Image: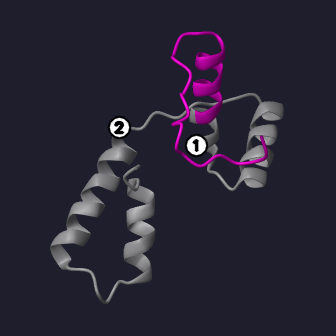
Amino acid sequence: MNSPDTATLLEDAADRIADISRADLQIMLRRAALRLRNGGSISMEDDIEETLRNLAGELGKTRNDMIRFIVREWMEKNTYLPVHDLDEDGNVDGNA
């Protein structure tokens, strides 16, 4: 199971601002500040940026999530990373 990312935690806190403790909010804001400070941006050519934004919108992902997805897929396809094995008892999408 994946743990929620900082953006998801901040969005959840914003939705329930009256219920979240000051200490929890401080921790989340500090994490967000660190990510912003340490995050590098990848700039692309205009046509790639537009396509990336369109694809991210269609799939309901952020631009950075799309970049991570594309890089992972490329690395798996070119055998730089092992391909995800499906659990025999796990759920799958589609028909067999």
Query: How far apart in space, not on screen, are marks 1 and 2 (Cα)?
Result: 17 Å
Q: Quadrant of residue 75?
A: top right
Is residue 88 toward the left or the right of residue 3 in the image?
Answer: right
Q: Earlier in the sequence, mark 1 or mark 2?
A: 2
Report the number of numbered marks.
2
Classify mark 2: helix, strand or loop. Answer: helix
- Between 94 and 70, the residue placed more toward the observer is 94
Q: Quadrant of residue 10?
A: bottom left
Q: What's the residue type where badge 1 is placed?
A: Asp
Name the residue carrying label 2. 38
Q: Is residue 84 magenta?
A: yes
Q: Quadrant of the C terminus?
A: top right
Is residue 45 toward the left or the right of residue 79 in the image?
Answer: right
Q: What's the residue type where badge 2 is placed?
A: Asn
Is residue 39 toward the left or the right of residue 77 in the image?
Answer: left
Classify mark 1: helix, strand or loop. Answer: helix
Q: Quadrant of residue 85?
A: top right
Q: Is residue 91 magenta?
A: yes
Name the residue carrying label 1. 65
**Residue 58: where, in percent of width, then height?**
78, 53
Give the extent of the magenta segment.
69-96
**Residue 87: where, in percent of width, then height?**
51, 37
